[in-house]
Amino acid sequence: MTSKVEMVTVVIPTLNESGNIAAVIRTVEKELRYPYEIIIVDGGSTDGTLDIVKDRNCKLIIETRRGYGLALRLGMKQAKGNIIVMVDGDGTYELKHINILLDRLTSKDAELCLATRMYDPNKAMGMMNFVGNKVITFCFNMLYKQNLSDSQSGYRAISKKAINEVEFKEDDMAYATEMLVKFSQKKFKMVEIPTIYKERKYGKPKLRRFKSGIEIFTTMLKGFTG
Ligand SMILES: Nc1nc2c(ncn2[C@@H]2O[C@H](COP(=O)(O)OP(=O)(O)OP(=O)(O)O)[C@@H](O)[C@H]2O)c(=O)[nH]1
Ligand SMILES: [Mg+2]
């Protein structure tokens, strides 16, 4: 149950996002209507990302062990807000929708609200990612009796209390799925808002599709078989 936004902690993992991170931070600062802090968890960027972040009013954590999930987990541990927003530092998510995301979380009294890119009118997501995501999300919905449309969205508002009640183990991309699996098991309420997908303007994706796909399916099945 999340009926009120007192303070928001925006947790952003970064690994070589110098072309994107300034705009991400700026948009949060401009748009977010609630009291907030921003925590950047950097994986040891060598492209100037750190210099950009140090100039901003953000808390910076450096964690050179690899892993998207590890970075998010570390950032969330330090969160002061009662609500956490996790979002990538690559500019692919629409941060102008951040208040809508938070308002849906509280109006629905949910533990998690995710921003789904599946109704993007521009259909900007690449075919491989789109199909992979559809298959994973379909299996997840079947196994855990949910009705989500974008299980791989990394743009979510989550109650800090809910995060504290769950123990996470996944260090990489499967973390996003592990969260949905464990929240389903706890019967936490999960809702969505539609958002758009924006293509990466700078830098390279760190996603290794095959490795992540295997890890995601393993995570889903592990949760199901106990
Ligand atoms: N701290 C940290 N951040 C990471 C690591 N791997 C990825 N990231 C960041 O996590 C976010 C998600 O990674 P992306 O490379 O965008 O993966 P993706 O969203 O699947 O791929 P795109 O299609 O390019 O958006 C980005 O902000 C990355 O910079 C890591 O090992 N450590
Ligand atoms: Mg991305």
Image: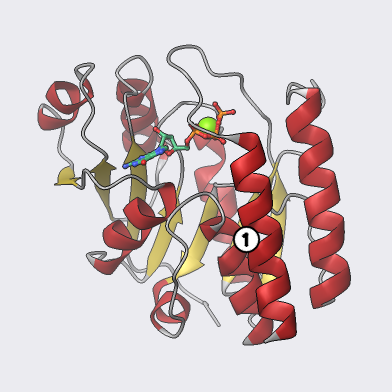
In the rendered view, does 178 fall on the left or right side of 19?
A: right
Give 43 or 153, whichever is nearer the viewer: 43
In the rendered view, does 59 fall on the left or right side of 131?
A: left
Q: Position of residue 157 (x, y in %)?
A: 51, 59
State whether residue 25 is above or below residue 82: above
Q: Position of residue 178 (x, y in %)?
A: 58, 67
Tell me, yes or no, if residue 189 can be seen here: no
Picture residue at 51% right of the left edge, 45% below the top: 98
In the rendered view, does 40 fall on the left or right side of 148?
A: left
Picture residue at 21% right of the left edge, 43% below the top: 64
State whether residue 111 is above or below residue 11: below
Picture residue at 60% right of the left edge, 77% below the top: 182
The amino acid pointed to by label 1 is Thr
Rendered-image quarter of ligand 1: top left
State whether residue 138 is above or below residue 201: below
Q: Position of residue 85 (x, y in %)?
A: 44, 54
Give 36 or 152, whichever is nearer the viewer: 152
Q: Local crowd at mark 1 within 10 Å, few (<14), some, or many (≥20)?
A: many
Circle 1 residue: 177
The colour scheme applied to this rendered structure is secondary structure
The secondary element bearing badge 1 is classed as helix
Give 14 or 104, whichever is nearer the viewer: 14
In the rendered view, does 123 fall on the left or right side of 105?
A: right
Q: Position of residue 141 (x, y in %)?
A: 83, 66
Figure label count: 1
Q: Quadrant of the N terminus?
A: bottom right
Q: Quadrant of the C terminus?
A: bottom right
Give 155 or 202, whichever is nearer the viewer: 202
User: Dividing the picture into quarters, in which one does residue 216 lie?
Assistant: bottom right
State whether residue 107 is above or below residue 101: below
Tell me, yes or no, if residue 156 can be seen here: yes
